[in-house]
Image (cartoon, rainbow, N blue to C red):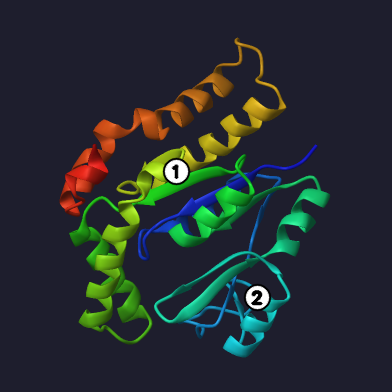
């Protein structure tokens, strides 16, 4: 049976990497796609762990060879997901989690409409700015220009939230991790057979996941949209 493709997108600094790392420690049978990028490593990042770091020339050669399931250029650097990552995970009977931006997610959804898409929102621009500054400080440099640019980009990305099936707000880390794990479990139940109605634990996971569906999340996310100044046309 083919595996499930999970897409998670979020503005830079939303805590996505932390949530993904905790999810992978809790959920079995879930591979993580290590993306390719032309940007340099940050802080303690290691090649083939956080990213496959490569040159712009090599990345563009991979594009010409049609090696990417998706790719995008963000802030002057390429990011992409190699097709073989998906094939390798599914051949092992595992599901695959893609950590990709809004541009890449749109490409993947067009090619794989059955993919499960999850958008992670920071609760407020102030909290996002603090997270970005803390990350920059840990990397040895705080540049307000870069932080402001990322905040503006975050607003643009959040405007696309309706393209995603599930929405999470990362204001309480443990809760966001639980919601992510519940979404994975619920989608597995849905595709591979829901357990008996008497299974209380399974039903609880399904209920948590359903509460995160975009159609059930409007009350939760409206304050976030307004805090980021998302236009009314995008909210309605």
Q: CA distance from mark 1 to mark 2?
A: 26 Å
Could you say where residue 177 lies in the image, as x and y percent from the top left? 46, 45
- Residue shown at the point (62%, 82%) measured from the top left: 60
Q: Position of residue 166 (x, y in %)?
A: 44, 39
The dot on residue 142 is none
Q: Position of residue 74 (x, y in %)?
A: 43, 73
Tell which tag, 1 or 2, sits nearer the viewer: 2
Left/right of residue 68 with respect to residue 210 in the rendered view:
right
Residue 222 lies in quadrant:
top left
- Determine the residue positioned at 58% across, 47% down: 6
Q: Residue furthest right?
A: 91
Circle count: 2
Closer to the camera in the image, 213 or 71:
71
Name the residue at 56% across, 48% down.
Answer: 109
Few, some or many residues within 10 Å of mark 2 (<14, 14–19, 20+): some
Percent x, y for residue 17? 47, 61
Q: Which residue is mark 2?
A: 63
Q: Quadrant of the N terminus?
A: top right
Q: Are marks 1 and 2 in contact (CB under 8 Å)?
A: no
Number of other residues with Cα within 10 Å of mark 1, as a class: few under 14, some 14 to 19, many 20 or more: many
Sequence-earlier tag: 1 or 2: 2
Q: Disc 1 on helix, strand or loop? A: loop
Q: Is residue 182 left or right of residue 147?
A: right
Name the secondary structure under disc 2: helix
Q: Is residue 45 visible?
A: yes
Rendering quarter of residue 88: bottom right
Q: Which quadrant: the C terminus?
A: top left
Q: Which residue is mark 1?
A: 164
Is residue 23 positioned above or below 165 on the image? below
């Amino acid at each position: 049976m083919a595996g499930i493709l999970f897409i998670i997108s979020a503005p830079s600094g939303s805590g996505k990497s932390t949530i993904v790392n905790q999810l992978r420690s809790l959920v079995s049978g879930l591979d993580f796609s290590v993306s390719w990028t032309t940007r340099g490593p940050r802080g303690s990042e290691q090649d083939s762990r956080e990213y496959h770091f490569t040159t712009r020339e090599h990345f563009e050669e991979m594009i010409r060879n049609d090696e990417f399931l998706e790719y995008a250029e963000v802030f002057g650097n390429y990011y992409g997901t190699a097709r073989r990552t998906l094939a390798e995970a599914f051949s092992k009977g595992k599901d695959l989690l893609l950590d990709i931006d809004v541009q890449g997610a749109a490409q993947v959804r067009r090619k794989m409409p059955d993919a499960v898409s999850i958008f992670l929102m920071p609760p407020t621009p102030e909290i996002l700015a603090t997270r970005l500054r803390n990350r920059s400080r840990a990397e040895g440099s705080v540049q307000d220009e870069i932080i402001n640019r990322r905040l503006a980009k975050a607003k643009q990305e959040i405007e696309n939230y309706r393209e995603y099936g599930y929405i999470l707000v990362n204001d309480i880390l443990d809760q966001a991790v639980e919601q992510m794990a519940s979404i994975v479990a619920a989608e597995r139940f849905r595709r591979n057979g829901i357990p008996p109605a008497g299974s209380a634990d399974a039903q609880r996971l399904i209920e948590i996941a359903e509460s995160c569906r975009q159609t059930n999340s409007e009350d939760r996310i409206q304050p976030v949209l307004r805090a980021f100044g998302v236009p009314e046309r995008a909210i309605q």
